[in-house]
Image (cartoon, grey):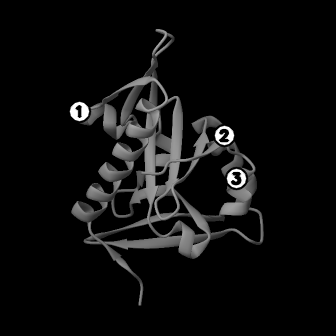
Amino acid sequence: MAMLYRFGAQLAVGADGEERVAQWLTGRGYRVSRVDDRDRQRRGVDLLVEPADGGDRVGVEVKTDRRAHATGNLFLETISVDGEGALGWLFRCEADWLVYLVAETGEALWYRPRDLFVAYWSWRQLAEVRSAWVENEGYRSRGLCVPLTIARSVAASIAWVTE
């Protein structure tokens, strides 16, 4: 039987991941603020991050996956709500950086969203990669399951976000 995801529970998982990444960045001297604007969040910006020396502020989207370690896969959401045909975060992210946090281990894969988008088109041709539907309450999401070993190869950086 497929696992059923509940929006409220997933929202809490996401908020926890955002907090972990924010604390990790703050501990390294960055100024971090949470984005409260729902419109901006829908476009894929969760955190605004600025170097302590006053460099350019960047937007960061955090995707927290509590099953990636167990499955060995990263999930790239291509369709958010099947009945509406709503595009998934892979196609909507307007952040400067996307952090894919493997919650169980604290592994944080840092991507330029454009690089992840480009990689998607070649990854979908690989035998190790599969398309999958995710069951949510009242709708389904679709995406690509990419082995972490492959996903790591495109990451601009990999860090360990530990508590």
- Graded by Cα atoms within 10 Å as few (under 14), some (14 to 19) or many (20 or more), the crowding at tag 2 reads few
**How many numbered markers are drawn?**
3
Of the numbered discs 2 and 1, the one sitting upstream in the chain is 1
Residue 100: horizontal and vertical position, in percent?
Answer: 52, 50
The answer to whether the residues at label 1 and label 3 have Cβ atoms under 8 Å apart is no
Position of 138 compared to 45: left or right?
Answer: left
Residue 157: image tag:
2
Q: Name the amino acid type tagged 1.
A: Asp
Residue 92: horizontal and vertical position, in percent?
Answer: 46, 40
Residue 162: horizontal and vertical position, in percent?
Answer: 48, 51
> Disc 1 to disc 3, how far (Cα)?
30 Å
- Graded by Cα atoms within 10 Å as few (under 14), some (14 to 19) or many (20 or more), the crowding at tag 3 reads some
Of the numbered discs 3 and 2, the one sitting upstream in the chain is 3
At horizontal 45% and vertical 15% (from top left) the residue drawn is 52
Residue 2: horizontal and vertical position, in percent?
Answer: 42, 84
Rendered position, 85 above or below 117 = below
At horizontal 72% and vertical 61% (from top left) the residue drawn is 149
Which type of secondary structure does the marked residue at label 3 adopt? helix
- Graded by Cα atoms within 10 Å as few (under 14), some (14 to 19) or many (20 or more), the crowding at tag 1 reads few
> Disc 3 to disc 2, how far (Cα)?
9 Å
Which type of secondary structure does the marked residue at label 1 adopt? loop
Residue 152: image tag:
3
Q: Name the amino acid type tagged 2.
A: Ser
Residue marked by disc 1: 36
Position of 15 compared to 54: left or right?
Answer: left
Rendered position, 154 above or below 130 = above
Q: Name the amino acid type tagged 3.
A: Arg
Viewport quadrant of the N terminus = bottom left
